[in-house]
Amino acid sequence: MLTGTGITAGYRNPVITDVSLTVHPGQTIGLAGPSGSGKSTLARVLALLHKPFAGSVTIDGETVTRFRFGATQRTRIGVLFQQPRLSVDPRFTLRRVIAEPLKGNQERVTELADLVMLTDDLLDRRPHEVSDGQLQRACLARALALRPRYLICDEMTTMLDASSTAALVGVIRAYQAETDAGVLAISHDDRLLTRWADETVRLSAPLRR
Ligand SMILES: Nc1ncnc2c1ncn2[C@@H]1O[C@H](COP(=O)(O)OP(=O)(O)OP(=O)(O)O)[C@@H](O)[C@H]1O
């Protein structure tokens, strides 16, 4: 289980207060709420990228004590962001993007490329030579490279059309069926969450300050 309990987090001031959320293995939890309600902030806390002011995160029963670069449990959680172009090095080929966490294991790169349906021709291109959907598939392959137990998708399909969205969700479902991974899916798109998630947690509108 990936669990956040009583999470209060933010930047100078808290943007979420006392929020609790659990993702069980094999389960897909949707996270919805108005713009600015703190969905991405909560996602970053659960991905161990942002230290909360209060509350705790546990992964399969282990309490996380270090966030950001010191977080040793980070490889157990894969993360996918809204804008693939901001999360890759523009000089890298897609093959190199996928290989980044793999320390040269080319066999696994090929396996992952097959999983996300990227052909050799696409793997040899750089980000500016592919579509957002193709680049997001490479980012998904990279996120799955170390076989995470949980995958956090933060508005992963906002830039994509319906067929690219369906393809990515299909790959994630297949990965879940094979590995029993848990997924947290953040989206503004209620119709997508209705189809994709087992249940959806809603953050309320941000407090005016
Ligand atoms: N790095 C940051 N530094 C300071 N404030 C931030 C930072 N990131 C987000 N915020 C603020 O925290 C609040 C919550 O932002 P967050 O991105 O978590 O909300 P969200 O629900 O994901 O919004 P959206 O749906 O628009 O992506 C907003 O008021 C935002 O301006």
Image: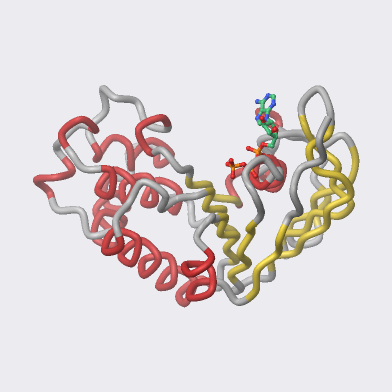
- For the N terminus, the quadrant is bottom right
Q: In the image as oriented, which residue stretches furthest toward the left?
A: 121
Tell me the quadrant of ligand 1: top right
> Residue 91 location, x and y as percent?
26, 22
Find residue 181 and report its image quarter.
Answer: bottom right
- For the C terminus, the quadrant is top right
Nearer-the-camera pick, 191 or 140? 191
> Residue 115 location, x and y as percent?
29, 62
Q: What is the tally of numbered marks visible in this picture? A: 0
Residue positioned 14% across, 38% down in the render? 124
Residue positioned 83% across, 34% down in the render? 14
Left or right of 135? Residue 84 is: right
Nearer-the-camera pick, 198 or 13? 13
Residue positioned 24% across, 40% down in the render? 95
The coloring applied to the image is secondary structure
Q: Is residue 111 above or below residue 205?
A: below
Nearer-the-camera pick, 158 or 64? 158
Left or right of 41? Residue 146 is: left
Left or right of 161? Residue 199 is: right
Nearer-the-camera pick, 101 or 119? 119
> Residue 25 location, x and y as percent?
64, 71
Left or right of 46? Residue 17 is: right
> Residue 7 location, x and y as percent?
84, 47
Q: In the image as oriented, which residue stretches furthest toward the front?
A: 208
Residue positioned 65% across, 68% down in the render? 200
